[in-house]
Image (cartoon, rainbow, N blue to C red):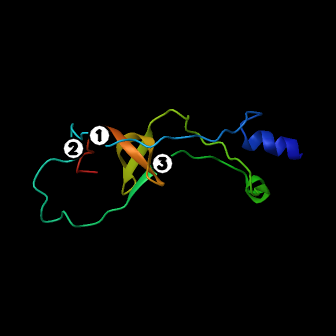
């Protein structure tokens, strides 16, 4: 039963590997902006941006069986672009990077802005 759980949480017998990321040097920021225009009136307003790495579906039993060292396989492929969301809506995609001691995301694509009628 323990082997069955391990196979389920590690992707049917696949081995989990730690990803080693190297720090990036500064890059010239050029390209399309998320929004164009004069936003000086609201420029200081803070918003929360989230980056979606992936998700997984577990049974309640599998959730309760988790312990330190357990690995949960996510739906996202390791080399697939990550989704950047603003207020739950996708606005960009990017790749995972290291910035000093923290993770970051390098934006690789700005997604089309959704209709204001939604």
Q: Nearer the viewer, residue 112 or 29?
A: 29
Residue name at image x 17 percent, y 65 percent: 42
Give the labeled residue for mark 2. 33
Q: CA distance from mark 2 to mark 3?
A: 20 Å
Nearest to N terminus: mark 1 or mark 2:
1
Give the labeled residue for mark 3. 52
Vertical relation: 4 (above or below) 39: above
Nearest to N terminus: mark 2 or mark 3:
2
Q: Residues within 10 Å of mark 1 (few under 14, many from 20)?
A: few
Residue name at image x 73 percent, y 44 percent: 9
Apparent side of residue 32 relative to residue 92 in the rendered image (left or right): left
Q: Quadrant of residue 54?
A: top right
Question: In terms of secondary structure, where does tag 3 sit?
Answer: strand
Apparent side of residue 95 relative to residue 92 in the rendered image (left or right): right
Q: Nearer the viewer, residue 23 or 34?
A: 23
Question: In terms of secondary structure, where does tag 1 sit?
Answer: loop
Question: In terms of secondary structure, where does tag 2 sit?
Answer: loop
Q: Nearer the viewer, mark 1 or mark 2?
A: 1
Q: CA distance from mark 3 to mark 1?
A: 23 Å
Residue name at image x 55 percent, y 38 percent: 76
Give how far across and how far down residue 61 sits, in percent.
Answer: 78, 55
Task: Identify the mark at residue 27; answer none if there is no mark.
Answer: 1
Q: Residues within 10 Å of mark 2 (few under 14, many from 20)?
A: few
């Amino acid at each position: 039963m323990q082997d069955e759980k391990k196979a389920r949480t590690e992707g049917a017998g696949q081995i989990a590997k730690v990803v080693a990321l190297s720090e990036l040097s500064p890059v010239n920021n050029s390209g399309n902006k998320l929004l164009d225009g004069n936003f000086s009136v609201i420029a200081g307003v803070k918003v929360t941006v989230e980056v979606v790495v992936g998700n997984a579906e577990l049974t309640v039993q599998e959730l309760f069986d988790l312990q330190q060292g357990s690995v949960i396989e996510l739906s996202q492929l390791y080399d697939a672009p990550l989704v950047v969301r603003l207020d739950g809506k996708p606005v960009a995609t990017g790749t995972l990077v290291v910035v000093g001691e923290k993770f970051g995301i390098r934006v690789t694509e700005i997604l089309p802005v959704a209709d204001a009628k939604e």
